[in-house]
Image (spheres, rainbow, N blue to C red):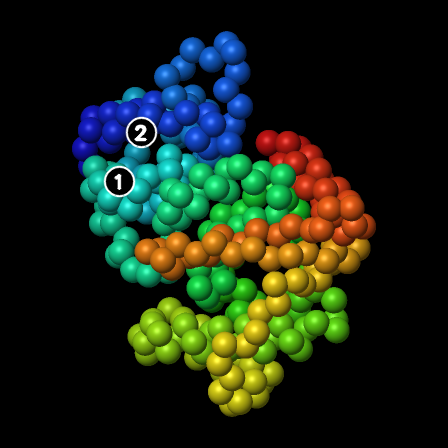
Amino acid sequence: MDRAQLADFLRSRREALQPEDVGLTKGPRRRTAGLRREEVASLSDMSVDYYSRLEQSRGPQPSEQMLAAIARGLRLTVAERDHLFHLAGQQPPKRAISGEHVAPGLMRILDRLADTPAQVMTAMGETLVQTPAARALFGDETRFSGNARSVVYRWFTDPSARDVYPDSDHQKLGRAFAADARGFAAQQGPDSRAQRVVDALLAESPEFAEIWADHEINATHELEKRVQHPETGVITVQCQFLVDPVQGQTLLVLTATPGTESHNRLQLLSVLGTQRLTADA
């Protein structure tokens, strides 16, 4: 671990970012070049003290998870992320499609959608980052580990994963999830993480095994769907997708038609999400 170079690199990347680059407001009294340390710490989901010690060449060796969080918080490119890992004495993650490093371009868009339900996901439905409004709607989907990180796995093994959708839509959604898993597992091959999720589901879920036996491919995903929330009720939303072809990740954005009850409910949910984020802080 090269503490001096790591500290210098972190400072340079922090000072190169402007508040508006990460969805923050640049106040008139700001004197700091770039972002403040506390802002980077918040974007990286870590304490200010921990991040500050790294910039002061006196912190411990960061874990791979911490480095990944810092890379995301500083909006690093894949090359910059790899350099960060090397400076910290860690081996960078393999550059694979569906990797977990969110492309800076997707992060910049997400930063401007704080009041809109939006999240970045891998092809297997692993949520990498969410806006506050998305967490208010779906819950914190980044907290899961192992196979449960995949929404496909949770759908067939955890009944609570279906609570966000009306019962009448469950069968259609289950078939769509299974078709997605089949296509991606075939694309990634027998030794992939996608195939391991499929194998686990075949062993654990008779419902998944029954759908899997139909060999359905490319099930239709509705661009309009219904989601439900205990505080706002059912909301009809339109789904917009932005795909990053290099990382194989998708930015999902949910909107509702202005002037409708669903639009009002989605706005209320966005306010609830912001309030909860402030309360947690």
Q: Is residue 198 above or below residue 206?
A: above
Q: Residue at x 29, y 46 (%)?
A: 78
Q: Is residue 7 left or right of residue 218?
A: left
* Residue 169: image tag: none
Q: Residue at x 65, y 36 (%)?
A: 274
Q: Quadrant of residue 194?
A: bottom left
Which residue has dot 1 on it? 80
Q: CA distance from mark 1 to mark 2?
A: 9 Å
Q: Secondary structure at mark 1?
A: helix
Q: Position of residue 141 (x, y in %)?
A: 55, 54
Look at the image and tell me in which quarter the C terminus lies.
top right
Q: Amino acid at mark 1?
A: Glu
Q: Residue at x 62, y 72 (%)?
A: 173
Q: Residue at x 38, y 21 (%)?
A: 34
Q: Amino acid at mark 2?
A: Arg
Q: Is residue 6 left or right of residue 201?
A: left
Q: Is residue 114 left or right of residue 82?
A: right
Is residue 59 visible to the viewer in this orientation of the structure?
yes
Look at the image and tell me in which quarter the N terminus lies.
top left
